[in-house]
Amino acid sequence: MQDRAVATRHTILAAAAEVIIERGYGGASISLITAQAGVAAGAVYFHFRSKEGIAHALLDLDLLEGLPPCRGPVLQQWIDLALLLACRLDADPKVRAAPYLAALADSQDGWTSPWLTWRATVARPLYAAAHEGELQTHVQPTPSPSC
């Protein structure tokens, strides 16, 4: 994809996330998204088939985007991931909108909740840290059943 197309797609996703955060998924419309993004409806439909397609793109969020390569103890990767997510939740509307949309996934036909994948991504460094002996013996990385 050309740089301009990538930038337009990013702009549309950020605008859609802002509209969804402000109005909810049901209150978001392609016309509101195009107005927020400052693009024509044709640009939105070039990248996405529908509002649902935009939601799926937001749900496919890469939690590891921007994570620096792990240096030092494996547990440091988990700490880095937690700090990255906290910063991205504060600064990136796409990251803020994704958990909201994930919570809707169970009630939407054809949507797959990313919670299990996200939880596995966050837990992976903890399992590696346990394997490397970086966790105290009483610390178990296995999530509780309520998670």
Image: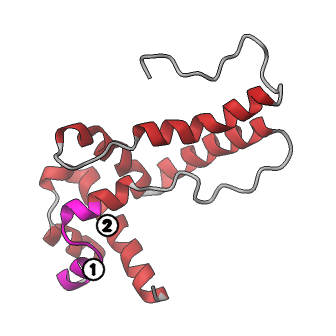
Q: Is residue 37 magenta?
A: no
**Quadrant holding the C terminus:** top left
| Residue for badge 1 | 38
Rendered residue at 24%/41% (across/down)? 104
Looking at the rendered structure, which numbered label has been put on residue 15?
2
Residue 51 seen in this snapshot: yes
Q: Is residue 41 magenta?
A: yes
Residue 135, given in percent of the width and then of the height, sits at 77, 22
Mainly helix, strand or loop, the magenta region? helix
**Quadrant holding the N terminus:** bottom left
Q: Residues within 10 Å of mark 1 (few under 14, many from 20)?
A: few
Determine whether the residue tagged by mark 1 lies in a helix, strand or loop. Answer: loop
Residue 36, given in percent of the width and then of the height, sits at 26, 71
Q: Residues within 10 Å of mark 2 (few under 14, many from 20)?
A: many
Q: Which amino acid does label 1 sit on?
A: Gly
Q: In which quarter of the image is residue 142?
A: top right
Q: Most extreme residue toward the right, as rendered?
A: 72
